[in-house]
Image (cartoon, rainbow, N blue to C red):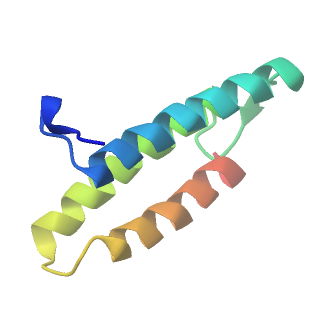
Amino acid sequence: MELNWMAWTWPTAIFFLVIASTLVVMTVLAVKFPEREKVGILKIPTTRGDRLFITLLGSAFIHLGWLLVSDIQLWGALVVSAVYAFIVFRWV
């Protein structure tokens, strides 16, 4: 299967599939288990969707910072982002 129509690479396609899958899972969770707001360390009420958005935004900045200060491959940034996601979903 060719992805030339938009200069896509397999990693790019996988990234967008993961994001789309995450949104589908979050939608199913919202329907099956209605969300309730939670007040964490930010002292503002957040839902699962809010925490997902905060996680995705923060992970983007983690990866950009990693590219700025390091020549090491992005696997390290992925690990840092996973820890960040755990922290956000647990305590924010």
Q: Nearer the viewer, residue 56 or 11?
A: 11
Whether residue 63 sits left or right of residue 48 in the image: it is left
Residue 47: in sight, yes or no?
no
Image coordinates of residue 44 in percent, x first then y, are 62, 30
Q: Residue furthest bottom?
A: 72
Vertical side of 50 occupied by 66: above or below: below
Q: Residue furthest right?
A: 33
Vertical side of 57 occupied by 26: above or below: above
Residue 70 placement: quadrant:
bottom left
Whether residue 8 sits left or right of residue 31 in the image: it is left
Count of numbered badges drawn on the protein: 0
Whether residue 51 sits left or right of residue 76 in the image: it is right
Q: Nearer the viewer, residue 1 or 68?
A: 1
Residue at position x 76%, y 33% in the image? 38
Residue at position x 22%, y 49% in the image? 9
Residue 87: in sight, yes or no?
yes
Image coordinates of residue 10 in percent, x first then y, are 30, 51
Q: Nearer the viewer, residue 40 or 31?
A: 31
Q: Nearer the viewer, residue 9 or 47?
A: 9
Residue at position x 69%, y 43% in the image? 40
Image coordinates of residue 74 in percent, x first then y, are 28, 70
Image coordinates of residue 81 in percent, x first then y, are 45, 61
Q: Please identify the quadrant where the C terminus is shown.
A: top right
Residue 73 placement: quadrant:
bottom left
Q: Residue furthest front?
A: 1
Q: Please identify the quadrant where the N terminus is shown.
A: top left
